[in-house]
Image (cartoon, helix red, strand yellow):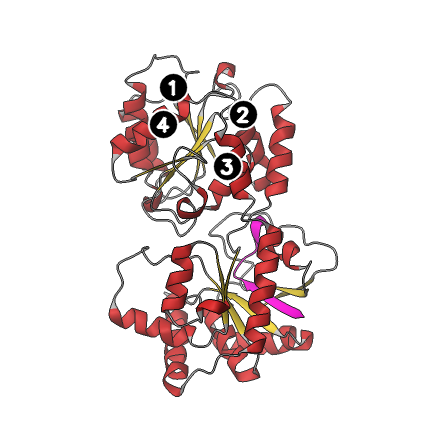
């Protein structure tokens, strides 16, 4: 089996997934727009033996569907893939690749993390999605709500497989264990955070954007602090990441008198993250909506107790409340505060860690690879047959996505 897999821009977890898939098929890794800067990732190292192609070279090319098709002809067609795996249904490059598959007679697999409860659904938008998804022959998701949503859009339920939302569990597990054996705090916070906070600080890792709900998390942190001492080593909060809301977050920290208890080291590359997972006491993720939240996988694989918003897709698969972690309503500050208190009260040898460790291994690169291989076989066995209306809908969606890219 030969599988080409397209992601818009490669990050560390994309490469981990592709490595898992390489155990089952000959792979071509296709990067849609390596120049994008939504995440400031250092380009990850590709595994030995992996074929690679990039569909765009400079900003602006991602708006040109004709160019994307030519690059697919030049770079992907010679690989002669049996299947092309694509992420979702909204990116212009993805939609153009889906049309290319239909024209070339190559079955496509839809990799999705969209849940059936993510957003309010509107009839017309859903009809458009159904027209697009009619071009997919199989699917790869993780939790029940993702499977249900994709099936509702028209992919046969028996052609939808599990394991999409994977990271490199082994990397985080090994690196965190290595850093636990060394003294001190990560260099970015050493000196700002007292040494006594090692093993008892809250960690969060997000882009600083509205849906990450950091304002409520800070309010909850203030409420948590109101019941504790002023000791800056007593469960401070470290917020990894950066973004447009940094100024507002800094102002809120000052207004809440949390300057000694909240620290902002900035955005860090993946190699630096295990130092924090190893030396924190607990992890919290408070998004008001999140299709998944891979940072939760990272924390659990690193044997760090977690509390996660019930509006995250990962919660609905990884979190059994009080067993593998804690969940909370992200719109209720008192529930976030409760979760912080529960995390702070956990003993170091809590059985929750073993349960979480076992659970997160249900989503791994190996499971991704097996799921993708099964989806590819299902796609080849029963290729999609989109109708004329579905093909017209896809054309409209490509044009609209190109306009949105140019805006």
Q: Earlier in the sequence, mark 2 or mark 4?
A: 2
Q: Which mark is residue 260?
A: 1
- Residue 114 appears in the picture as rendered: no
Does the magenta segment cover residue 226? no
Image quarter where the C terminus lies is bottom left
Q: Position of residue 56 (x, y in %)?
A: 56, 66
Q: Which residue is mark 4?
A: 340
Instruction: Estimate the spatial distance between the alpha carbons at disc 3 and disc 4, rounded to whole Å.
Output: 18 Å
Is disc 2 placed on a helix, strand or loop? helix
Q: Give the left or right position of residue 240, taking residue 119 as reference.
A: right
Residue at (40% x, 67% y) in the render: 151
Is disc 1 placed on a helix, strand or loop? loop
Q: Earlier in the sequence, mark 1 or mark 2?
A: 1
Q: Earlier in the sequence, mark 1 or mark 4?
A: 1
Residue at (58% x, 65% y) in the render: 374
Frontmost residue, 83 versus 94: 83
Q: Earlier in the sequence, mark 3 or mark 4?
A: 4
Over which residues does the magenta segment extend?
Answer: 1-14
């Amino acid at each position: 089996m030969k599988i080409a897999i397209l992601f818009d821009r490669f990050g560390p977890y994309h490469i981990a997934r592709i490595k898992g898939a390489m155990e089952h098929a000959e792979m071509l890794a296709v990067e849609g727009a390596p120049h994008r800067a939504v995440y400031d990732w250092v380009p990850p190292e590709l595994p030995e033996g992996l074929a690679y192609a990039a569909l765009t070279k400079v900003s602006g090319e991602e708006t040109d569907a004709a160019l994307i098709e030519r690059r697919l002809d030049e770079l992907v067609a010679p690989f002669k893939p049996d299947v092309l795996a694509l992420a979702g249904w909204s990116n212009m490059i993805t939609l153009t690749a889906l049309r290319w598959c239909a024209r070339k007679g190559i079955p496509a697999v839809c990799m999705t993390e969209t849940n059936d409860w993510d957003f309010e659904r509107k009839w017309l938008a859903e009809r458009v999605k159904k027209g697009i998804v009619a071009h997919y022959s199989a699917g790869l998701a993780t939790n029940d709500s993702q499977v249900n949503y994709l099936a509702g859009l028209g992919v046969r339920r028996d052609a939808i497989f599990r394991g999409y939302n994977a990271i490199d569990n082994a990397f985080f597990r090994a690196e965190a264990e290595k850093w636990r054996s060394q003294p001190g705090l990560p260099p970015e916070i050493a000196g700002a955070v007292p040494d006594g906070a090692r093993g008892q600080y809250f960690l969060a890792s997000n882009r600083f954007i509205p849906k990450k709900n950091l304002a409520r998390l800070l309010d909850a942190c203030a409420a948590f602090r109101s019941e504790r001492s002023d000791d800056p080593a007593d469960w401070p909060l470290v917020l990894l990441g950066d973004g447009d809301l940094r100024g507002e977050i800094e102002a809120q920290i000052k207004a809440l008198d949390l300057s000694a208890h909240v620290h902002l080291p900035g955005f860090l590359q993946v190699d630096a993250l295990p130092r924090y997972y190893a030396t924190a006491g607990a992890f919290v993720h408070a998004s008001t909506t999140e299709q998944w939240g891979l940072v939760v996988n990272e924390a659990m694989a690193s044997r760090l107790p977690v509390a996660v918003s019930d509006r995250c897709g990962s919660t609905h698969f990884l979190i059994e409340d009080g067993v593998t972690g804690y969940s909370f309503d992200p719109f209720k500050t008192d529930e976030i505060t409760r979760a912080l208190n529960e995390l702070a009260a956990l003993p170091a040898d809590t059985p929750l860690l073993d349960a979480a460790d076992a659970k997160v291994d249900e989503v791994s690169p190996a499971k991704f690879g097996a799921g993708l291989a099964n989806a590819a076989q299902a796609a080849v066995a029963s290729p999609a047959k989109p109708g004329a209306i579905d093909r017209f809908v896809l054309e409209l969606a490509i044009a609209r996505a190109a306009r949105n890219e140019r805006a």
